Image: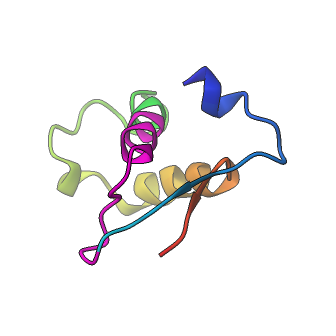
Amino acid sequence: MRNIWGTRDDERLTVNWNKLGQPDDKLATKLSSFIGTIVCDGKNAPLTYKNWHKVPEHYKDHIWALVQVNDTILCER
C-alpha cells in the first residue's frame, strides 16, 4: 500500500463503479486493500468486534474520514 499512502498530492487513482455501486475495475482491489490497512489498525476499528454491523458508528465515521482525507483514490459515482 506504499504506492497509495506515498502518492504525490497531484496524482489520483479514479475508481469506476458499476450500477450496484460496487467498484468494478482493476483499482477495486487497491481500494479494498487501502481500506484494509485502515481497519487493521486497532485504533480505527477495535478488534473486539467480530461483526462489522456491530461496530459503533463513530468508528465507521472515523474510517470514512480517513479515506476521504487521503484523496489519492478518487471515489466518484
Q: Residue at x 56, y 51 (%)?
A: 67
Tell me residue 23's x, y (percent).
35, 58
Count of numbered circles in the view:
0
The structure's colour scheme is: rainbow
In the picture as drawn, the residue positioned furthest to the top comes out as: 2
- Residue at image location 19% in from the left, 57% down from the top: 53
Most foreground residue, 54 or 27: 27
- Give the image location of residue 76, x and y in percent: 54, 70
Please provide percent x and percent y for residue 66.
60, 49
Q: Is 64 colored magenta in this rendering?
A: no
Residue 44 position within the rendered picture, expressed as x and y whole percent measured from the top left? 47, 39
Which quadrant holds the N terminus?
top right
Residue under the image location 46 percent in, 30 percent down: 37
Q: Is residue 31 left or right of residue 54?
A: right
The magenta segment:
19-35
Closer to us: 73 or 51: 73
Is residue 30 in the magenta section?
yes
